[in-house]
Image: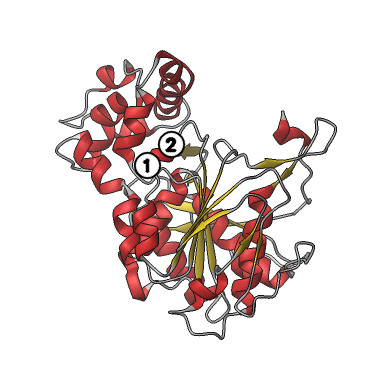
């Protein structure tokens, strides 16, 4: 209900299809000036799978953006939920060679094993989250794509057993870990967990999470890893749910999305500090967060969302204007382009067919 009431700007996008080396494709939705459209590319007629540990899609798209569209301007990636986990894993894998200028991770699960245990913790979790997620995965695989036809003759995948699964773990046991060559679901979950890659991150990375997130639970948040890496900043709000972060002091207030404001401020700051030294950029960006009832520690900040959106200070200690608008150039080159990449990995296209996970 809050999502329907939330105000948001009307942005028109131009869609570009990008073929990938593995035969799949992703769509990039660009916010561009009227009359300017990206070039078309060929779309393969073969849907391909990906999982929470698969980072090649992001790697290829980021490389293409740097090569063909944004060779020198700041390039900021924004990932949400599973997409943020894949994004952070990719950034850690790339290390100092990461072509991104900075990134924001919102609602990251961090630890797949921890969150899987939470899914099975109670009847409520099982009924509200685990069961429906497994059902949706099955519907996507069997009824909303031709993906099941690709695995009809796979020696290790039993489609009857797969279709009977009612939990995400079981779905991953019957399909994901077999399709990607893992010996067990536990091995897949350990490999997919982005928390283990945080120590390798070498670009400014803002991490946003909520204590009351029912899916990506608070106990999986890697506080120690954040404190140990000068490039990371973690903001944990008391409330926000899973990707919600709605603001408002009464039922008559029109809700706003706190996280969207923070992401815009962050991207604006990165654009303004692009000429600064990269190694110290994160600490200078995140030296202070001004928020009611803030509880601040080195490298990690816990914030209460009862007040207005937090104001991140730049390297001179000057408050970033919350009302400032990110220019079209910045939005196209720094925010929209990569934010869409992590939605795009859920929309791997084929002609008249789709597969997303």
Closer-to-camera residue (124/86): 124
Label 1 sits on a secondary structure element that is helix
Q: Which residue is mark 2?
A: 217
Q: In this view of the protein, which residue sits in the foreground, 111 or 62?
A: 111
Q: Position of residue 3 (x, y in %)?
A: 70, 35
Callout 2 touching callout 1 (CB < 8 Å): yes
Residue 93 appears in the rendering: yes
| Residue at 41% across, 13% down | 123
Question: 233 and 330: which one is in front?
Answer: 233
How many callouts does the rendering have? 2
Residue under the point 70% across and 53% down: 309
Residue at the spot 21% in from the left edge and 30% down from the top edge: 153
In the image, farthest residue toward the right: 252
Q: CA distance from mark 2 to mark 1?
A: 6 Å
Q: Quadrant of the N terminus?
A: top right
Residue 198 at x, y percent in the picture:
35, 59
| Crowd class of label 2 (few under 14; some 14 to 19; many from 20; radius 10 Å) | many
Determine whether 292 is above or below 129 in the image.
below
For label 1, the crowd category at 10 Å Cα-Cα, with few meaning under 14, some 14 to 19 and many 20 or more, is some
Percent x, y for residue 314? 63, 74
**Residue 32 coordinates in the image, percent (x, y):** 71, 65
> Quadrant of the image for the C terminus?
top left
Residue matched to label 1: 220
Q: Which mark is residue 48?
A: none
Q: Is residue 298 above or below residue 195?
A: below
Quarter of the image for residue 78 reads bottom right
Q: Residue at x 55, y 69 (%)?
A: 287
């Amino acid at each position: 209900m809050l999502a329907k009431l939330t105000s948001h700007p009307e942005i028109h996008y131009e869609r570009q299809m990008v073929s990938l080396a593995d035969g799949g494709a992703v769509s990039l939705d660009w916010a561009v000036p009227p009359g300017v459209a990206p070039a078309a590319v060929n779309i393969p007629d073969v849907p391909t799978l990906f999982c929470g540990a698969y980072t090649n899609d992001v790697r290829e798209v980021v490389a293409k953006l740097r090569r063909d569209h944004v060779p020198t301007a700041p390039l900021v990636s924004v990932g949400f939920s599973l997409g943020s986990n894949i994004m952070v894993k990719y950034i850690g894998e790339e290390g100092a060679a990461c072509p991104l200028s900075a990134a924001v991770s919102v609602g990251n699960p961090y630890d797949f094993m921890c969150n899987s245990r939470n899914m099975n913790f109670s009847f409520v979790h099982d009924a509200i989250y685990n069961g429906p997620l497994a059902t949706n995965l099955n519907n996507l695989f069997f009824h909303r794509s031709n993906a099941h036809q690709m695995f009809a003759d796979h020696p290790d995948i039993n489609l009857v057993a797969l279709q009977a699964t009612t939990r995400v773990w079981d779905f991953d046991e019957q399909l994901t870990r077999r399709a990607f060559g893992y010996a067990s679901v536990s091995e897949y979950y350990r490999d997919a967990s982005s928390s283990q890659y945080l120590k390798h991150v070498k670009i400014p990375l803002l991490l946003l999470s909520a204590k009351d997130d029912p899916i990506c639970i608070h106990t999986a948040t890697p506080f120690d890893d954040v404190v140990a890496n000068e490039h990371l900043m973690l903001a944990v709000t008391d409330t926000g749910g899973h990707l919600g972060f709605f603001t408002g002091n009464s039922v008559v207030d029109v809700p706003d999305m706190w996280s969207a404001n923070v992401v815009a401020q962050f991207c604006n700051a990165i654009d303004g500090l692009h000429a600064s030294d990269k190694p110290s950029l994160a600490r200078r960006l995140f030296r202070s967060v001004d928020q009611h009832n803030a509880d601040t520690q080195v490298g990690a900040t816990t914030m209460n969302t009862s007040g207005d959106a937090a104001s991140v200070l730049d390297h001179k200690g000057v408050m970033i204007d919350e009302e400032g608008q990110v220019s079209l150039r910045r939005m196209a080159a720094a925010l929209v382009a990569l934010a869409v990449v992590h939605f795009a990995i859920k929309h791997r296209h084929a002609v008249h067919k789709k597969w997303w996970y």
